Structures are given as structure tokens and as C-alpha cells.
Amino acid sequence: MNKFAVTALIFFISIAFSSLSQATLITNLTQTELDDRDFSNAEDHLTDDLLDVNYINYKGYDWAWVSPVNVEIFGGNTLYAPELQKNWLFADESLLNILKTELTLADFTADNGDIIQSAQFFNSTFEHVDDDNFGPDALRSELTDPNHFMVSLYEGFETFYVRKTNDPTLIPEPSILMIFAFGLITLASRKKLLS
């Protein structure tokens, strides 16, 4: 089924069932903060125990598959900016290139066959992504401008957000101080041996 037909089908289904069920957006922000797009008090609810359930880790970044659409408003759904969850960002061009050339649908598929996604953390009603749309030509991060002349094409693209992870190879501060002290002791010892 082509992308436009799938997008239209999702739109009509969301309209039909919007009064029957409402998804619960996972956020600590009030409705007023959401309406005002005030993310200054946002907390990050995508915690370590949700790794490989709601997001994956690759090359020092966490990758969240956040929505089956790429526009802020689609039907009855609002797709929020990554700042809704503290520390999350739009992927820049280099990161988007990694997503398109190195990561595959298999990377976002759990051992039990479930898709690893976090739509409920960034969408007002959507709780799914469209795994049949995963492909390098249908992946985006920055949201499509609703006034863009090709918005009807881009609105159905899959959306991904990223955040930098703590690099485990970095030496923690106490270790740095210990290495520095060891270096000073070595230098002082060399000086005494040479005298």
C-alpha cells in the first residue's frame, strides 16, 4: 500500500476512534505548558530501564523512533518537539546519515518481535510507529513545516530523536585526579634521581 493511502487511513482511523480512546502522553508537564510549548520544566522519562524497549543505543547516542508522522499536527494528534523529554534533540545531518545508512529495522526490533519505539513519550494520541515505512527515504528528524509545498509527502515520514549518552570510556573525575597526582609524584621522583 502506498504511503499516502496508509497516511490517509491512519488519519481517518484516528478521527473515528479519537472519542473512544485517548492515549496518555508520558510527561510531567501541565496542559498549559504543553499548549505554550514551554519545555523548561521537562523531565526525561526515557530512563535506563527502558533501553531496548523504547529506545536503542548506537555510537554514543540513544535513538528514539518517536512517530509515524513528521508534522506537528496530524488529525487529532500533536507530535511534540524532542525537548518534551529533557536531553532529547533533533538529529543533525551526520546523525541522520547514520540512521539512514547504518541502522536497520532489525536494530529497532526486540527479541520478542516488538518494535522498539517511544511514540507515547512524544505524541498526544499516537502510540505506534509504522515499521513497514522504515527505509532511508522515509526517515526524518526535524519536523516538516506545515507550509512546505511537499508537506503531504513528508508528513507520513517516520520521525526519530536522539540524545547523547554518557561515554563509558571517559575517565571519571576521581581517576583523573589520581592520574594527575601519580604524574606529579613520578616527575618529582625523576628529579630526585637525577640530582
Image (cartoon, grey):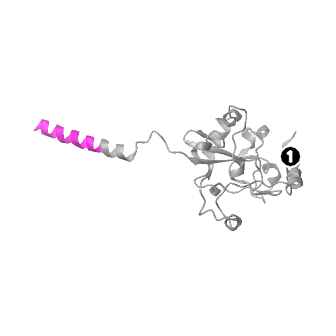
Image height of 187 relative to 17, above or below: above
What's under tag 1, amino acid-wise?
Phe
Tally of marks: 1
Circle 1 — which element?
Answer: helix
Q: Residue 95's spot in the image, x, y percent?
A: 61, 44
Q: Residue 137's spot in the image, x, y percent?
A: 74, 41
The residue positioned 86% from the left and 58% from the top of the image is: 19
Q: Residue 103's spot in the image, x, y percent?
A: 65, 36
Q: Magenta part of the protein: which range?
A: 180-195
Q: Residues within 10 Å of mark 1 (few under 14, many from 20)?
A: some
Q: Which of the pair 139/131 is nearer the observer? A: 131
State which quarter of the image contains the C terminus.
Answer: top left
Q: Main secondary structure of the magenta part?
A: helix
Image height of 108 relative to 159, above or below: above
Q: Which residue is mark 1?
A: 4
* Residue at the limit of the structure toward the left, as seen here: 195
* Residue at the limit of the structure toward the front, as seen here: 20
Q: Residue 190's spot in the image, x, y percent?
A: 17, 37
The residue positioned 13% from the left and 39% from the top of the image is: 192
The residue positioned 70% from the left and 43% from the top of the image is: 117
Image height of 128 relative to 20, above or below: above
Q: Which of the pair 71/52 is nearer the observer? A: 52
